[in-house]
Image (cartoon, helix red, strand yellow):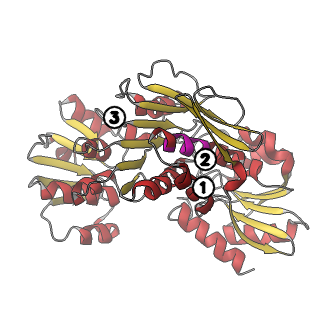
Amino acid sequence: MNLPDDILIVGLGMTGVATARFLSQMGKKITIVDEKPEQDLFASLKALEDIRFIGHFGSHRREDFLDHPLIIISPGVDSDLPLLKEAREKGIKVIGEMELASRFIVEPIIAITGTNGKTTVTTIIGEMFKKAFGNIFVGGNIGDPLINYVLKGAKARALIAEVSSFQLETIETFRPQTSILLNITEDHLDRYRSFSEYKDAKYRIFENQQQEDYAILNKNLPDTDGIQAKRLFFSSKDEIKEGSFYQDGLMIVRLQGQEYRYERDASPLIGVHNTENLLVALLVAHIHGIEKDCIEEALKEFKGLPHRIEAVRRIDNILFFNDSKATNVDSTKRALESVEGNVVLIAGGKDKGGSYRALESQMKKVRALILIGDAKERIKAELGKYSETHLESDLSSAVKRALQIAKDGDVVLFSPMCSSFDMFKSYKDRGNQFKAMVESL
């Protein structure tokens, strides 16, 4: 791909650093901007101390966005920033790092998106592929950005990539051989003007696929008729003619006249949502010719990821779960469906704009609701009538309150429904602090 000699990078997180190193390797003149002040970017700047670039940090300057023929943005940068809109109006091309990387990748890409379950499915598929083929790249929106694969010059059998709606906003030619859309529920409405706009961004994963490619979708998703790729479906409830489904304790894959069966109990992952995650992984594995023994070994060994309905500790027959990765209502709903018994639910954080009422159907399991963070008053207004409700100033006091309230056999579930950035650095920081607090009880 021919790139102009002068390029602007917007955002200096992990992706921005990787993009800068790649463009420097290509001999390009690089300018980097980030709204964070320079002192907050110490680690990123240190990672770039051996390459040449111009950096402007703090408030964005209009001239930076209008003086370069190509702008590459990181996933966390809003593609609708007024300065980016103005740049597009002047004919300046704006793409994301994922689009840039894909133009230099010839190996098959398996791309996974959805509101919930992306990281789990990406990781399970990666484990199955590693057992079968060894040389596999797993990254994208988790771990290594795709541009790092290009930068290192490695050659993998396939690339397994988690893909976010933010990354899909700026694609032009990005074309996975296999695209997966797990589910869509309300999320990121602090970024998108409507749920419809968010949904449209997710569906762009299929935009450039051709008839020889595969599109894997949840059977319950609407609006799939315009997809050009071969459509395969998965369901935890309904039998599927071509795809994967759950029935009587078995996960069944039907593909090109063949049927493959796996015991659901072969995997230690709990919950209906994880049944769906496993159905997707099994289907992808068989599409790509992975042998059954490799699949079964990966099913048995993969015990889940941290901060996703993670059992922490049992105190006096009260079991504490860390589900800090639950940054939206649907994720918390799935967690409540997965745990058994009465629940003391700790929730709250930075409000993302969606309604919390989707949790109403599960509130009968909630003995008490303990709320923290910026969203606690809004959650109380929508859900407080369904159970005993407490407002706490911080997570530590919420954990202590939960232990006071919980009864023998109860579950204390920390599943926030909100992002972490009002009180914590990330969902991982939030989850690790929760675990430390529980261990100290």
Residue receiving disc 2: 278
Q: Given contact means CB atoms under 8 Å apart, are the residues at marks 2 and 1 in contact? A: yes
CA separation in Å, label 3 and label 1: 28 Å
Q: Judge whether residue 115 can be spotted in this image.
A: no
Chain part drawn in magenta: 278-285
CA separation in Å, label 2 and label 1: 8 Å
Position above or below: 42 against 4: below
Q: Amino acid at mark 2?
A: Leu
Q: Is residue 309 left or right of residue 420?
A: right
Q: Quadrant of the N terminus?
A: top left
Residue 279 highlighted magenta (yes or no): yes
Residue receiving disc 3: 175
Q: Amino acid at mark 3?
A: Arg
Q: Residues within 10 Å of mark 3 (few under 14, many from 20)?
A: many
Task: Tell me which residue sits at (49%, 33%) in the image.
Answer: 198
Q: Could you tell which of marks 3 and 2 lies nearer the N-terminus?
A: 3
Image quadrant assignment for residue 435: bottom right
Residue 138 highlighted magenta (yes or no): no
Q: Amino acid at mark 1?
A: Leu
Task: Tell me which residue sits at (67%, 42%) in the image.
Answer: 251
Position above or below: 175 against 226: below
Residue receiving disc 1: 299
The numbered dot on residue 156 is none
Q: Is residue 206 left or right of residue 125?
A: left
